[in-house]
Image (cartoon, rainbow, N blue to C red):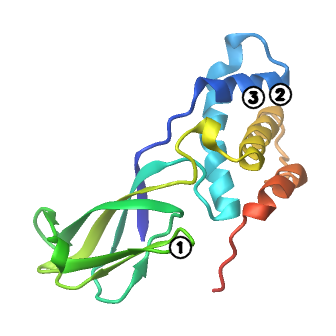
Amino acid sequence: MKRAIITPAVLAPSALAELKDWLGITVPGDDAQLTALLRMAPDLCEDFTGTMPLQQVCEEVLPATPGWTRLSARPVQAITSVQGIPAEGPRFALAAGDYRIELDADGGGRIGTLRPGSAGRVAVRFSAGLAADWAGLPDALRHGVLRIAAHQYRLREDEAQSALPPAAVAALWRPWRRLRLA
């Protein structure tokens, strides 16, 4: 499975303002670096919690099988398109009756390809994420994102960086953590 972000989450200007306030920075000199850290921090949040914090449009390439195949991101808000990928030639749209989709109550999404035609794989485009925007993020997730970005900023010149996430961030994110049995 390979996931690509088609439309990344929009980071509100208030996120940068909150991070600068947390760090006590009042000048714009480090804004680019701080913004880059804020863009990276939700990925670390997703890695730790198993939940994509901000909504994004994603695409995953999956095998075309009749059995259920789970999407890797959650919570899935909507599955918007399914395209067949043949061994040779361009992608093609699969008709609605050629596949089945299901959104689970726990935020998971899955697909089963009933009639793939010449496709050996399918590209599934979907929207996933917990909050539509920065202001909609639950406080614990938002503060954890800010703190991990601040942590990375403070350690930017330290070659022996500590393990991620720091204990304070892990404590904020732990209630949101989804564990899976392998």
Q: Is residue 94 left or right of residue 145?
A: left
Residue 19 in which image quadrant: top right
| Residue corresponding to mark 1 | 105
**Rendering coords of residue 8 (x, y %):** 46, 43
| Residue corresponding to mark 2 | 22
CA distance for labels 2 and 1: 36 Å
Residue in front for this viewpoint, 157 or 78: 78
Q: Is residue 52 above or below residue 41?
A: below
Q: Is residue 159 above or below residue 167?
A: above
Residue 167 in which image quadrant: bottom right
Report how many numbered discs are placed on residues in the image: 3
Q: Secondary structure at mark 2?
A: helix
CA distance for labels 3 and 1: 34 Å
Q: Earlier in the sequence, mark 2 or mark 1?
A: 2
Q: Residue at x 53, y 62 (%)?
A: 75
Q: Label 1 amino acid?
A: Ala
Rate crowding at label 3 as few (under 14), some (14 to 19) or many (20 or more) other CA atoms within 10 Å: many
Q: Is residue 95 above or below residue 14?
A: below
Is residue 162 visible in the rendered structure shown here? yes
* Name of the residue lying farthest toward the bottom: 67
Q: Secondary structure at mark 3?
A: helix
Asked whether the beta carbons under mark 2 and mark 3 sit within 8 Å of each other, the answer is yes
| Residue corresponding to mark 3 | 19
Is residue 86 visible in the rendered structure shown here? no
* Name of the residue lying farthest toward the top: 27
Residue in front for this viewpoint, 85 or 130: 130
Q: Secondary structure at mark 1?
A: loop
**Rendering coords of residue 48 (x, y %):** 70, 61
Q: Residue at x 33, y 75 (%)?
A: 101
Q: Label 2 amino acid?
A: Trp
